[in-house]
């Protein structure tokens, strides 16, 4: 039996502009995010990706349109309740970490929200193990490497167990092992029933990981793609860019049949070999 997933977030006809700019940065934006869904937000610099996320976080208020979280208007939630339910992981961890030790930083949220001691301890142990942070708990996070800081910032969000987590370029400037750790953690978050929305320019990661795609153009207009087929002909709002898999096999397949992911590339190559075409 196919699992029926409910929409955890609904954005309907959202328009937003900044006070100093009469033109809408976001124009008539509508989409849904389902529970457990892995959503990727793609768009050029200045398209409004961060602005859209700030509207979801209720940092910005739209001029018109509505945002629903768990079928309730976003404005109906108290600030503390919303901060525990929807969280944001910054690209720059220095914007997020501030305590004098890693342990204090991770525990800041649960202490602010008065988590019971047993719950705080259990969740703390879980995120420390998940992100391999035990050896640095007593260190000042400001003295850590960039990758370590990113893990501490993520731990401070995961310990709250929010229903929806927003990320800005989660793999940027990380070495390959740490990138893979983050991908594994993202997949585990989704498997645990949480929803994720990631803003990125990394097309290879987007195609490999994402399930649903939100494409913002420079005019603040959004297109929603429910599968990866649009990658085959190039991502229009990013200059018709192709994934590496598609670039490699361009010329060996019709444009609309180009492989997009590593798995598709392997299957495509196997078919070429089986047919003795190479």
Image: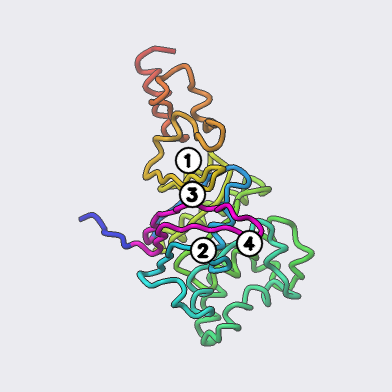
Q: For the residue carrying disc 1, how many other residues have a C-alpha within 10 Å: few (<14), some (14-19), or many (20+)? A: many
Q: For the residue carrying disc 2, how many other residues have a C-alpha within 10 Å: few (<14), some (14-19), or many (20+)? A: many
Question: In this rendering, would 147 be left or right of 248?
Answer: right
Residue drawn at (65%, 68%), measured in percent from left and top? 134
Query: Secondary structure under badge 2?
Result: loop
Residue at the disc numbered 1 = 207
Q: Quadrant of the N terminus?
A: bottom left
Residue at the disc numbered 2 = 62
Residue at the disc numbered 3 = 40
C-alpha gap between disc 1 and disc 4 = 36 Å
Q: Is residue 278 visible?
A: yes
> Which of pointers 2 and 1 lies earlier in the amino acid sequence?
2
Of residues 43 and 141, the one nearer the viewer is 43
> Which of pointers 3 and 4 lies earlier in the amino acid sequence?
4
> In the rendered structure, which segment of residues is drawn in magenta?
7-35
Q: Tell me, yes or no, whether the highlighted magenta stretch contains residue 37.
A: no
> Which of pointers 1 and 4 lies earlier in the amino acid sequence?
4
Query: Secondary structure under badge 3?
Result: strand
C-alpha gap between disc 2 and disc 1 = 30 Å
Task: Classify 39 as above or below 273.
Answer: below
C-alpha gap between disc 1 and disc 3 = 9 Å
Q: Are the two marked residues, 4 and 2, in contact with CB atoms closer than 8 angstroms?
A: no
Of residues 20 and 163, the one nearer the viewer is 20
Question: In this rendering, would 106 be left or right of 267?
Answer: right
Task: Classify 2 as above or below 203.
Answer: below
Question: In this rendering, would 148 be left or right of 126?
Answer: right
Q: Quadrant of residue 43?
A: top right
> Which of pointers 4 and 2 lies earlier in the amino acid sequence?
4
């Amino acid at each position: 039996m196919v699992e029926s997933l409910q929409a955890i977030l609904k954005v309907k006809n959202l328009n937003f502009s900044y006070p100093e700019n009469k033109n809408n940065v976001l124009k008539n934006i509508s989409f849904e995010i389902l529970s457990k869904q892995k959503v990727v937000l793609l768009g050029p610099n200045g398209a409004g990706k961060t602005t859209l996320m700030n509207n979801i976080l209720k940092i910005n208020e739209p001029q018109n349109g509505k945002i629903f979280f768990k079928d309730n208007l976003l404005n109906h939630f108290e600030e503390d309740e919303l901060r525990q339910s929807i969280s944001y992981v910054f690209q720059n961890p220095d914007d997020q970490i501030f305590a004098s030790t890693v342990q204090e930083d991770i525990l800041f949220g649960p202490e602010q929200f008065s988590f019971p001691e047993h719950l705080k301890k259990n969740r703390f142990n879980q995120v420390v193990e998940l992100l391999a942070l035990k050896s640095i708990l007593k260190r000042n996070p400001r003295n850590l490497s960039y990758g370590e800081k990113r893990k501490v910032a993520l731990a401070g969000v995961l310990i709250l167990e929010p229903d929806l987590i927003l990320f800005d370029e989660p793999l940027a400037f990380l070495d390959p092992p740490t990138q893979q750790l983050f991908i594994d953690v993202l997949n585990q978050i989704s498997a645990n029933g949480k929803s994720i929305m990631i803003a990125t320019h990394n097309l290879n990661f987007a195609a490999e990981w994402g399930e649903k795609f939100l494409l913002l153009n420079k005019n603040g207009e959004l297109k929603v793609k429910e599968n990866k087929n649009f990658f085959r002909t190039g991502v229009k709002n990013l200059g018709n860019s192709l994934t590496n898999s598609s670039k490699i096999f361009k010329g060996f397949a019709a444009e609309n049949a180009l492989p997009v992911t590593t798995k598709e590339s392997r299957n495509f190559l196997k078919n070429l070999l089986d047919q003795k075409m190479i």
